[in-house]
Image (cartoon, coloured by chain):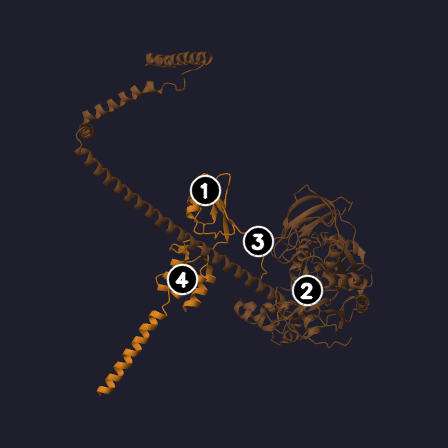
Chain colours: A orange, B brown
Amino acid sequence: MLAAILVMVLIGVVTGLVLGWSAIRFKVEGNPLAEKIDAILPQTQCGQCGFPGCRPYAEAIAKGEADINRCPPGGEEGVKKLADLLGIEPKSLDEAHGTPKPKSVAFIDEQVCIGCTLCIQACPVDAISGAAKQLHTVVASECTGCELCVAPCPVDCISMVPIAEDLPHWKWKHPVIELKRVA
Amino acid sequence: MTRELHTFKGGVHPPEHKAESSGRPIHAAPLPRKLVFPLRQHIGNAAKPIVEVGDHVKKGQMIAAAEGAISAAVHASSSGTVTAIEPQPVPHVSGLPDLCIMIETDGRDEWIDHAPLDYRTMAPAELRGKLRDMGLAGLGGAVFPTGVKLDPGATQHCPTLIINGGECEPWITCDDVLMRHRADEILQGVAVMRHLMGSTEILVGIEDNKPEAIAAMRAAAAALDFPVEVVAVPTLYPSGGAKQMTEILTGKQVPSGKRSTDIGLQVFNVGTAYAVARAVHHGEPLISRLVTVTGHVLRPQNFEVLIGTPMQTLISLAGERDGTTGVLMGGPMMGMPVPDLEAPVVKATNCLLVQSRELFPPLPKALPCIRCTRCADACPAELQPQELFRFAKAGDFGRAQEYHLFDCIECGCCSYVCPSHIPLVDFYRYAKSEIWAHEKDKRAADLARERHEFRQFRQDREKKEKAEKLAAKAQAARAQAAQDQVRRAELATEPAPAPAAAAPADPDAKKALIAAALARAQAKKPDAAPKNVDDLPPAQRRQIDEIETRRAKIRELARQPLESEEKNT
């Protein structure tokens, strides 16, 4: 009886030590689930979800504090991917957090810009170049189309221009095949 | 010549229709009034314009330079004036315009200075750079910049060079007539390629439905000082595909996702070899090519066409007929419909196939896939087209990629044999383009994440630096204050200046202090008298006096209005 208890205690101590050691040795920095969610989010950094950027939203989803349907730039497809990852039912986008729009980039009307730098401070990805009392301009290739620069502009010179379809952006369409009616 | 030939899996035998255009000699197309040069004629980055509207250019002059690693230059194919640099219709299935340089020809067709290159004494990298600046790109259809392909790499060497004269696609005969009439020059180009690649074995593969071309190439090869083996391969579509030709001639398969140089060989089209010969032995950039105009026209034939010539011009030359239903660029298997015939002939244009209802009756309506797997039997890339179709249709692109979607060469064999007439290749193109778009979006998202994280890092750093700076300042101020206190204490012990220093607490004493300071300042004023005025010569002294009197007058004048103002108020 005593021997059995001793053996069980010993096993318990040994496994506890192994577990404790491996918890230190194989410690994972950050939340791997949040990483995976962050990889699905479109990185627009627009804040429409109510969080200051995609990463905080991903962390909130990982903790179960936020719903998965709050990202309009990700669209229904993004919601579906998140649902697949988390093993839950996809939902339709929450209208309260905005609706999907065609992908656009910000454009500064250079005739009107007064060089106040407010848009530069608002841009989450440093895609606007310029300095105080100098003309500002948007680096279109870096712009995520988050619209955060539109509201701060005191002279309302920033507009969102949808990306026009040109050859480098052209995609083959899903073929429409007319099926023969057999019955 | 008894080389053991291999076979690739699948393939089809569509009606050849080669005889219509192959019999006639090469006809040089006349100089058009207007030439249009798209900047995106090759795979890779679009060329960058180096001319401006209004510039006069000569034939062979570079008008757009290669941009980035994979790119090729664009040249004016005749002399004239640049009239516009703007989006124009280009031969692309979307019908979208793209940036083009427009040239109005002056009819003189005046060449720029050009001279042959002594390729044997040039460094390989320099020669490749020259070929890139001469705008060379593969003329077999993929238009991959030739300069990039002619690099066997630092450690690899490329023992086998395959010259592809397969031309398996029905209707097209431009490579056939090129080999019949210009075999010598093709082999001159091959000599340059051999020099660059360090190849020891050179194989020319030609389908056996072109006996004249095989004979001409064999005759030309016999006169060479290096061995070139001209091999007749069985006619079977798509034996002219680079991977299929490689397998037929060597029995080797290029592994999925690898390049042919990884297995020690490289494939070039005969037209590319000819263009290399013109570039090296004549110094001529790629400004013209052979184009087959065939199908529903009066005189199907091959034209030597300046790049940039509007397609409509060629069709008119070949004799337009009533009942034309459309034009394909390329052949019936892989060609793409040309939405606008004002689009120019580009480096990739090997054939203009004019369609009519009799020659190309509209396809019957598609039926659902019955999974008969006839497409899998026909597929030369050994894929499962019926599965790829299922995944592409359902948008399951990950599975499509697992089934090696990107090994599909879009040859059209599957669509050709499909008993349900499903446009299978369209689905594969759709799936590929969706996958590319996804990858592009993913790269953009990664970039945005990186930039956002860096911005946050920068803001944190700035905040920290500011806090540190403020802390340092506060500390300095505290130290200063402590020092002042010590000094004040020292001063307090000294009796003499004590009343003045300690007094400021009393307002009257403060006033007295200010008054004393003012008095001191007043007393200093005469000290501000001019310096360096001793021992001056009389003339200068006089001048100074004059100036002083003038100054006095001005002072007087300046005071007057003030006084008048005072009077008014």
Q: Amino acid at mark 3?
A: Glu
Task: Tell me the distance, in whole angstroms, between the alpha carbons under discs 4 and 2.
Answer: 56 Å
Q: What residue does disc 3 label? A: A165
Q: Amino acid at mark 1?
A: Ala
Using a 10 Å C-alpha cutoff, classify the residue at mark 4 as few (fewer than 14 neighbours), some (14 to 19) or many (20 or more): many
Q: Is residue B537 left or right of residue A176?
A: left
Q: Position of residue B395 (x, y in %)?
A: 53, 66
Considering depth in this image, is B551 or B37 the residue closer to the camera? Answer: B551
- Disc 4, disc 2: CB below 8 Å? no
Of tags 4 and 2, which is closer to the observer? 2
Q: What residue does disc 1 label? A: A131
Task: Judge whether B89 appears above or below B371 on screen.
Answer: above
Of tags 3 and 1, which is closer to the observer? 1
Q: Position of residue A40 (x, y in %)?
A: 45, 62
Using a 10 Å C-alpha cutoff, classify the residue at mark 2 as few (fewer than 14 neighbours), some (14 to 19) or many (20 or more): many
Instruction: Indicate the quadrant where residue B392 lies.
Output: bottom right
Q: Is residue A149 left or right of residue B341?
A: left
Q: Amino acid at mark 4?
A: Ile
Q: Is residue B324 visible?
A: no
Task: Tell me the distance, in whole angstroms, between the alpha carbons under discs 3 and 1.
Answer: 32 Å
- Disc 1, disc 4: CB below 8 Å? no
Task: Tell me the distance, in whole angstroms, between the alpha carbons under discs 2 and 1.
Answer: 52 Å
Q: What residue does disc 4 label? A: A68
Using a 10 Å C-alpha cutoff, classify the residue at mark 3 as few (fewer than 14 neighbours), some (14 to 19) or many (20 or more): few
Q: Residue at x 18, y 33 (%)?
A: B492
Which secondary structure, mark 2?
Answer: helix
